[in-house]
């Protein structure tokens, strides 16, 4: 057990957490506005990367501690109401706006499973935050984090693809639901079995710069691969081989990779601007 942080240290941690949330939300909103204003296909990758970054930032910066830590059921209800419901509403509006087919709504079950998984992650973050308040936090070397990180993604992709092919890729809706559900469950199980603590407390701009430097290998590769595989499954049918669909969507991985680096660079700039404008946090 380490030394219990001082009241000033707690205040700085809370300030950085709030700023991290504001920065991630601002980048996400700007990405969404840019997509809807221009309708450029490339900006789908930017919006996807910004959404993934918004969900990932709490695991690295931490969340505000709460005592007592709410039950897992309460946290799951809060996340489902706070994330899944608005996301489903936005999907419905997008379907109407683009006059798309109702098959696009096949992603709704995946969103629900994803929101439930995020609720479990959030609940774990709350427990980690309470440990940090008590001075029980610990670090972890980069390589130890890296193999855990990739083990989760590789295993989740493999099991997800197995589930999709077991259901049958000719039924795109069911295959996508099977892939997404299996992916989230396996990734969650591995992350819980091999947890990674948040980064050591530092000014938010320094933390975001670290994430930006890590982003090409840490986020761009697994996120690009995951999005590409999901899109390939959506295009795979009885007359289209999965390998052909994967090759056709290969550039998506590049778009998502570049967008991911751009998103974390933007988060670093926003964090630095907030610190310069209001004082170091």
Image (cartoon, helix red, strand yellow):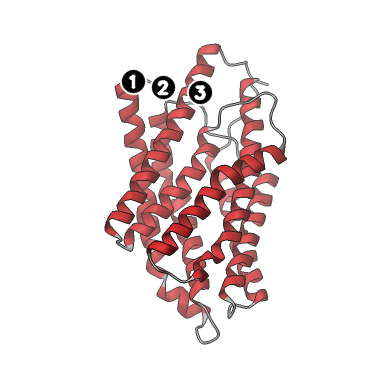
Question: Mark 1 — residue?
Answer: 278
Image coordinates for residue 4, horizontal then vertical, percent: 62, 16
Q: Residue furthest left?
A: 38
Q: How many marks?
A: 3
Residue 190 lies, in percent from the top left, at 67, 51
Where's residue 156, x and y in %? 62, 59
Q: Residue at x 41, y 48 (%)?
A: 50
Q: Secondary structure at mark 3?
A: helix
Pointer 3 or 1: first along the chain: 3
- The quadrant the N terminus occupies is top right
Q: Residues within 10 Å of mark 3 (few under 14, many from 20)?
A: some
Which numbered mark, 2 or 3, is in the foreground of this view? 3
Most extreme residue toward the top is 7
Please say if the residues under marks 1 and 2 sit with CB atoms less than 8 Å apart: yes
Q: CA distance from mark 1 to mark 2?
A: 9 Å
Q: Which mark is on residue 14? A: 3
Of residues 186 and 81, which is closer to you in this image? 81
Q: Closer to us: mark 1 or mark 2? A: 1
Q: Can you tell which quarter of the image residue 210 is in?
A: top left
93 w.r.t. 100: above or below: above
Q: Secondary structure at mark 1?
A: helix
The residue under the point 54% across, 32% down is 62
Question: Residue 244: x, y in percent?
Answer: 46, 80
**Does residue 179 sit above or below 120 in this rendering?**
below
The residue where tag 2 is placed is: 281
């Amino acid at each position: 057990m380490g030394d219990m942080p001082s009241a000033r240290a707690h205040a700085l941690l809370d300030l950085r957490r709030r700023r991290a949330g504001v920065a991630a939300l601002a980048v996400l909103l700007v990405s969404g506005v840019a997509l809807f204003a221009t309708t450029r296909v490339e900006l789908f990758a930017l919006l996807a990367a910004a959404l993934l970054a918004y969900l990932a930032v709490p695991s690295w910066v931490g969340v505000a501690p709460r005592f007592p830590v709410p039950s897992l059921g309460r946290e799951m209800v809060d996340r489902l109401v706070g994330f899944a419901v608005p996301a489903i509403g936005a999907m419905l509006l997008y379907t109407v706006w683009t006059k798309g087919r109702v098959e696009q709504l096949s992603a709704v079950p995946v969103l629900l499973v994803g929101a439930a998984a995020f609720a479990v992650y959030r609940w774990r973050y709350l427990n980690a935050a309470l440990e940090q308040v008590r001075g029980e936090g610990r670090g972890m070397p980069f390589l130890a984090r890296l193999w855990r990180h990739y083990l989760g993604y590789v295993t989740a992709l493999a099991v997800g693809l197995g589930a999709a092919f077991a259901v049958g890729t000719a039924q795109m809706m069911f295959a996508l639901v099977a892939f997404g559900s299996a992916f989230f469950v396996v990734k969650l199980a591995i992350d819980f079995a091999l947890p990674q603590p948040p980064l050591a407390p530092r000014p938010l701009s320094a933390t975001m710069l670290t994430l930006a430097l890590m982003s090409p290998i840490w986020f761009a590769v697994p996120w690009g691969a995951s999005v590409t595989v999901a899109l390939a499954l959506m295009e795979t049918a009885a007359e289209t081989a999965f390998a052909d669909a994967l090759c056709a969507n290969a550039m998506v991985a590049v778009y998502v990779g570049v967008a991911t680096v751009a998103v974390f660079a933007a988060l670093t700039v926003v964090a630095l601007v907030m610190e310069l404008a209001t004082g170091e946090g």
